[in-house]
Image (cartoon, rainbow, N blue to C red):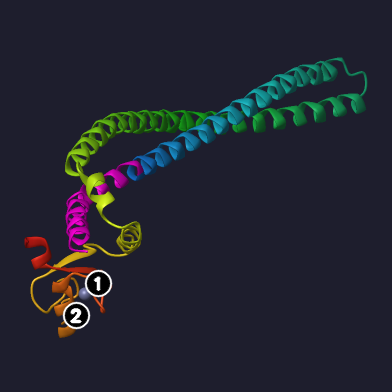
Amino acid sequence: MREELLALAKLAEMDDSARDLDAELKQIPQSLEELRDSVQTLETMLAQERQQLEEAEQLKLRQSTELKERNEGLQRARKKVAQASSIREADAGEREVEANRRSIKEREEELARIGQAIEAKTASLAEREKDFEEARAVLRSKEEASKARIAELEEQRGKMLSGRDELAVKVPKSIIKRYDRLKTGITNVVLIIKDGTCPGCRMALPPQLTIELQRANELHQCPHCRRIIIHKNVVDD
Ligand SMILES: [Zn+2]
């Protein structure tokens, strides 16, 4: 078992040294994804503002058309008053003139409000477009930088883990499986025991276990933290 445990200890040491690289390799796509999400949010907001602006423009167009119609109505009403052949006809014409005037005033006020809203919306839209373009540029450069960084990390990782496969074939599959399972929950899964204490959890190991560890006849785990423990004599020999 000595040979197998030694291979496992070396393999675990490699994995531990590559842990920071692994963490960074995992983190890069995550932060890119977050950035993509925020660019996407800006794009959605931009689309909404464009839609609102378009609606305001349409409203303006409708009000302008109505204003034109009301102006024509006013001309017709004035004509009626001028051409009235009775007081009753003249009164009706005057009422029509008045109604058109009121409506024209309302339309003009409404148009002024819409005009202001369009102006404000246009300004904020320009601001949003700028934000969006900036965010997209940041995303692009971050994507580029990430690609380069990932390549760099992969290369370092490859170097760091060269020879790992050769070590892995020396370790029984059941042990590799147990090692991989432990690795998902804790760090420094394989520890070298120098005295009667587990360096992982700092708990004292039973004396009998320490003796068995030196014999290296089987795989042992710390009874307290479940880490795989190997006696230093096994590694040093
Ligand atoms: Zn322990």
Along the viewing direction, whichever of 17 and 209 lies nearer the viewer: 209
The magenta-colored residue range is 1-29
> Which picture quadrant has residue 146?
top left
33 or 182, nearer to the observer:
182
Q: Residue at x 93, y 22 (%)?
A: 86
Disc 1, SS: strand
Q: Nearer the viewer, residue 188 or 115?
A: 188
Q: Measured from the top left, where is residue 138 in percent x and y?
A: 30, 32
The reply to whether the C-beta atoms of the residues labelled 1 and 2 are less than 8 Å apart is yes
Circle 2 residue:
209
The answer to whether 103 is drawn above or below residue 163 in the figure is above
**Residue 89 visible in the snapshot:** yes
Which quadrant is home to the C terminus? bottom left
Q: Is residue 117 magenta?
A: no
Magenta stretch prevailing secondary structure? helix
User: Residue pushed farthest bottom?
Assistant: 207
